[in-house]
Amino acid sequence: MELRHLRYFVAVAETLSFSQAARRLHLAQPPLSAQIRTLEDELGVRLFVRSSRGVTLSDAGRAFLPAARETIEAARRAAETARQVATGETGTLRLGLISPAATAGVAARLAHFHAAHPRVNLKVRFEDGAALHRQLQAGLLDATFTRPLVADPHFSQHRLEHHAQLLAIPATHLWAQRRHIPWRLLDGAPVLLINPESNPNYGQLFLRTCAKHHVSPVVNYAADDLSALIWLVSAGLGVCPYPSSLAATQPPGIVFRPFTPAGPRLELILRWANTPPSPLLRAFLDSFIGE
C-alpha cells in the first residue's frame, strides 16, 4: 500500500465519482480505477459498491476512510517537520552562557531569534567558561557565550560586546565615597576572587592589570562563582573586580566604582565549532550576528 493509493481512495470517497476524483487528482479515469482496484486487492476487501447508478462506499470503505485521512495528514505533518528541520525553522538549540553574558543586549538578540523561530526549543545552560568550552568540544552544546580563549582552529568566534571592569565595594567601605578608584589603593588591600579551579580565567586579567600598575593586592580566592563572590562583598569581607554588565542587578549594600586609569575591557564572544553548521545553527548565526 502506498500513500498515493490512500489519496486516490479519499478523493473517490469524498466525491463518490471516479470521473470527478480523476479531475481533482489530474489523472485519467481508467488509471485511477485501476489503482483503486489494486488497493482493494491488497486489502482483500471492496471499498466501493459499484452499480449502474454510480458508486458508494461499502461498510469496509466507510470504516477505512477516517484512518486513511489520518494517515495522509500524519504524512503531511512529517514532511512539514522534516522541511522545518532542514531549513532551521524547528529543533533544539543548546546554548551555554557564563553569568556575565546575561546582558540586556544578549537577551534582546535571543528574543529577536525566538520571535522569528517560535518552533525552536532553546535550552540554555549557565556554567563557568572552562566547563562550557569542554561541553562545546564534546558536542553537548551548539554555541557558547563566553570570554575569549586562546585561538583554537577548531572553533569560530564572533565578538558581541565589551564591558568595563569595575570594583565592587561594600557601601560602608571608605572607598565607597570615591567616584573613582586609583589602582594604587589596591596595593596590600584584601581582594576577593573566584577560585581558579572553578574559573581559571576570571582573575587573570585583573591581576595582570594590577601588575602593570605595580600594585599587589592580598588575594583571597573565596568563592566558586560570581553570585557567591558578590555576596561576600556585601558582607564586608573585601572588594572584587566585577563586570559592568552585571552591576545593575546586584543586591543592595554594594557600590560599583570605575578604576582610574580605566580598568581592562571584558570581551563577550559567541563561539561555535568550526565545522559546517546544522541548518538550525546556521539560522541562529544568521539571525544573531548577521553572518
Image (tube, rainbow, N blue to C red):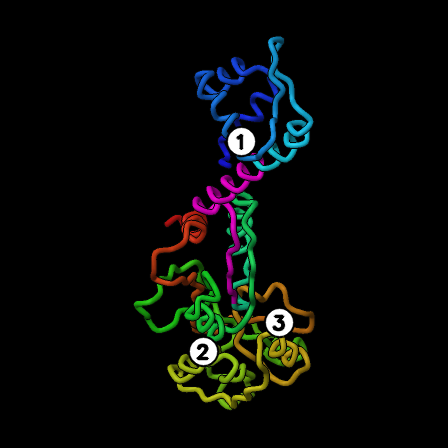
Tell me residue 219's x, y (percent): 52, 88
Q: CA distance from mark 2 to mark 1?
A: 72 Å
For label 1, count other residues whose C-alpha is less than 10 Å away and answer few (under 14), some (14-19) or many (20+): few
> Tag 3 or tag 2, which sits nearer the N-term?
2
Q: Give the amino acid at mark 2.
A: Asn
For label 2, count other residues whose C-alpha is less than 10 Å away and answer few (under 14), some (14-19) or many (20+): some
Does the magenta segment cover residue 75? yes
Tell me residue 85's x, y (percent): 47, 47
Kindly state the secondary structure of the residue where label 1 is placed. helix
Q: Is residue 281 above or below residue 198?
A: above
Q: Please give the label number shown on residue 123.
A: none
Tell me residue 56's x, y (percent): 64, 18
- Decide: marks 1, 3 in contact (CB < 8 A)? no
Please tell me which residue is depicted at 48% across the width and 77% down the height of the picture.
202
Q: Give the amino acid at mark 1.
A: Asp
> Tag 1 or tag 2, which sits nearer the N-term?
1
Does the magenta segment cover residue 198? no
Kindly state the secondary structure of the residue where label 3 is placed. strand
Asked if residue 23 shows in the view, the reply is yes
